[in-house]
Image (spheres, grey):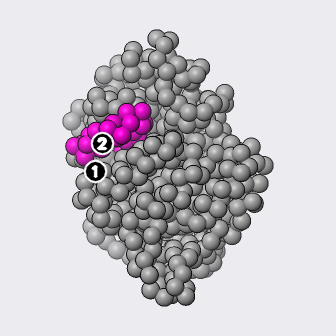
């Protein structure tokens, strides 16, 4: 029997499933396997969906389930779609009236289906949207847009807003996600726009894919030039490789070119970028100022009244601009829960010496709002992270293996602490993505650099963001670090950092010496591999005291806790997928003439 919800139009046999594995056929009737069932239900800020031109700073209730109609390499939500049967144990059945009541109790103005594809639970989403509309709430979703025309026709009456996640313009890009064609998605964008639904489009930008993104912009402009385009700088998770990740500078240059086609273009996954602001297409004045707020998220810092420029031009923004935004606690909100789930999986993988399915009882406890919400505080310190290892060991029945990992990490920590004690502490600045994006003082990376014997100047910054804040040129110069470390999560080449420092006139000892270092992925946050980053940072801060053999330590860690040699792994930004960096830290050799792990 044919399923008519998405353009795969799967033939589902009796008792079988289609591509998404979320529908089955019983007695000639296709129905959901998990109706009215959700993995997470939590309040979020609208800019983390992300939506930028609809009710700025609004607070919405976000719901998600598991599964997707696509299978995209490097998906940020891969943890929700890989082991559907395992994750399904964590689903909670919540009828529409109860979800709406939660939204009302939380003071939310609407409900949004996000994190995974709503088409895999379309009847449930329609029931929920109908209930929400009846209660005076707005409704919308983030989707790949691969609905059939008949399915979208059922959904449109209940939608106020939508973010369509585009893979590109070519069929080849969609084939990479195991879909056949791009055309249905652009057909549906036109249908939604003509029906009066607020549409924003996001497009994945892979390295070398500039022409693909530019052509997407031309197609959107032909539908409506008022559609905001969100450029998602590709960050390789899952099975994707680092070679597919464009730099932030490359992404900003692409956004500059896109502004010749569309007036409202935004860059995501790029901490500190100048391309998250809304600027007047006539005079260039900033109408909305924003900063990076986690993967695929933003935070509105300042907004002009009525989204109107002083020159008289109005930005097409729908709905009221709230005076204050909603700050989600901990790892809650936007796509941060996917990172929280992967952090737990990163530890579990080490306890089973490689990847294997989680036991049935594992995900129900991990996916609870209480666990995700409390995880943030637990991972701000090394001791807290060690406690998390013990907790995950209990949850997956691997307490003995957790003790082995705990003892290994603790031993390396004590060696580092002993080696650097009583040595003068160099001034360290910890950044992410671009030089002017400073990590919060309370972040794990700051604790790591202090344990390695640094005086981390981020402690002087009072403001907080997620995971940090934009600094002014004067604020950066006042910190005057002697060493600058770039996060291994959302990173950039050291030479790009130094180029930006020169262009912006940033003055600091670290800049003049070229002492800028990028950590390999997973070496400073989100993974037990942080112990490798600790030793690497100790080498760079205290070369007179520390000379850890990082290649040997990496090989030992991989063989003991991943059951493989590092040469067999494909490096990327996943916490749970082991990377394989070639040689520890990446110093700014082209500018500073530095050697690996030498401070210059």
Q: Earlier in the sequence, mark 1 or mark 2?
A: 1
Range drawn in magenta: 210-233
* Image x and y of residue 196, in percent: 51, 41
On whether residue 220 falls in the magenta region, the answer is yes
Q: Nearer the viewer, residue 322 or 567?
A: 322
The image quarter containing residue 71 is: bottom left
- Note whether 573 is above or below 312 in the view shown: below
In the image, is residue 240 part of the stretch drawn in magenta?
A: no
Number of marks in picture: 2
Q: Look at mark 1 in the image and give the residue it sits on.
A: 169
Residues at badges 1 and 2 in contact (C-beta under 8 Å)?
yes
Q: Is residue 365 visible?
A: no
Q: Which mark's residue is nearer the viewer, 1 or 2?
A: 2
Query: Please, is residue 528 above or below residue 229 in the view?
Result: below
Residue 126 is situated, as x and y percent measured from the top left of the image, at 60, 60
Residue 379 drawn at (x, y percent): 59, 53
Numbered disc 2: secondary structure? helix
Q: Nearer the viewer, residue 74 or 215?
A: 215
Taking depth in this image into account, of 359 and 35 the one nearest to the observer is: 35
Where does label 2 land, which residue? 219
> Around disc 1, counting alpha carbons within 10 Å, would you say few (fewer than 14), some (14 to 19), or many (20 or more)?
many
Residue ID at (74%, 43%):
107
- At 24% from the left and 59% from the top, the residue drawn is 172
Q: Quadrant of the C terminus?
A: top left
């Amino acid at each position: 029997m044919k399923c008519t919800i998405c353009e795969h139009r799967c033939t589902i046999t009796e008792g079988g499933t289609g591509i998404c594995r979320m529908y089955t056929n019983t007695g000639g009737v296709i129905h959901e396997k998990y109706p009215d069932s959700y993995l997470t239900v939590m309040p979020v800020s609208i800019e983390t969906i992300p939506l930028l031109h609809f009710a700025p700073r609004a607070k919405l209730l976000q719901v998600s389930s598991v599964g997707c109609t696509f299978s995209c390499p490097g998906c940020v939500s891969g943890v929700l779609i890989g082991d559907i049967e395992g994750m399904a144990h964590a689903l909670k059945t919540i009828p529409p009236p109860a979800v709406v009541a939660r939204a009302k109790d939380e003071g939310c103005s609407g409900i949004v289906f996000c994190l995974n594809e709503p088409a895999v639970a379309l009847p449930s989403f329609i029931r929920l949207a109908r209930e929400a509309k009846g209660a005076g709430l707005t409704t919308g979703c983030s989707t790949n847009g691969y609905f059939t025309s008949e399915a979208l026709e059922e959904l449109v009456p209940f939608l106020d807003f939508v973010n369509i996640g585009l893979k590109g313009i070519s069929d080849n890009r969609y084939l990479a996600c195991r879909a056949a064609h791009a055309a249905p998605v652009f057909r549906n964008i036109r249908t939604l726009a003509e029906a009066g639904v607020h549409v924003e489009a996001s497009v994945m930008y892979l390295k070398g894919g500039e022409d693909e993104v530019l052509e997407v912009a031309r197609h959107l402009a032909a539908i409506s030039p008022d559609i905001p385009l969100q450029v998602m700088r590709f960050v390789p998770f899952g099975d994707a490789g680092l070679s597919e990740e464009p730099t932030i500078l490359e992404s900003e240059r692409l956004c500059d070119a896109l502004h010749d086609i569309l007036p409202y273009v935004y860059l995501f996954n790029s901490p500190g970028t100048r391309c998250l602001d809304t600027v007047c297409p006539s005079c260039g004045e900033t109408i909305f100022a924003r900063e990076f707020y986690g993967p695929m998220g933003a935070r509105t810092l300042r907004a002009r009244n009525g989204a109107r420029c002083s020159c008289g031009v109005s930005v097409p923004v729908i709905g009221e601009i709230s005076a204050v935004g909603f700050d989600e606690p901990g790892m809650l909100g936007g796509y941060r829960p996917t990172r929280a789930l992967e952090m737990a999986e990163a530890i579990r993988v080490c306890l089973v010496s490689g990847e294997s399915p989680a036991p049935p009882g594992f995900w129900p406890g991990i996916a609870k709002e209480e666990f995700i919400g409390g995880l943030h505080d637990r991972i701000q310190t090394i001791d807290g992270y060690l406690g998390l290892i013990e907790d995950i060991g209990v949850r997956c029945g691997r307490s003995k293996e957790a003790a082995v990992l705990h003892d290994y990490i603790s031993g390396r920590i004590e060696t580092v602490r002993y080696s650097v004690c009583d040595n003068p502490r160099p001034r360290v600045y910890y950044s992410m993505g671009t030089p002017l994006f400073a990590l919060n003082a309370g972040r794990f990376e700051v604790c790591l650099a202090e344990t390695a014997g640094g005086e981390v100047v981020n402690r002087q910054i009072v403001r907080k963001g997620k995971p940090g804040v934009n600094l002014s040129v004067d604020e950066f110069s006042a910190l005057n670090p002697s060493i600058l470390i770039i996060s291994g999560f959302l990173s950039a080449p050291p030479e790009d950092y130094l180029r930006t420092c020169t262009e912006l006139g940033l003055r600091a000892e670290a800049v003049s010496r070229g002492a800028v270092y990028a950590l390999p992925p997973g070496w400073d946050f989100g993974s037990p591999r942080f112990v490798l980053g600790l030793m690497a940072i100790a080498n760079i801060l205290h070369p007179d005291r520390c000379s850890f053999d990082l290649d040997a330590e990496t090989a030992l860690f991989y063989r003991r806790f991943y059951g493989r040699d590092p040469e067999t792994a494909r490096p990327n930004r996943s916490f749970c997928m082991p990377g394989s960096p070639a040689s520890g830290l990446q110093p700014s050799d082209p500018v500073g003439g530095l050697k690996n792990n030498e401070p210059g």
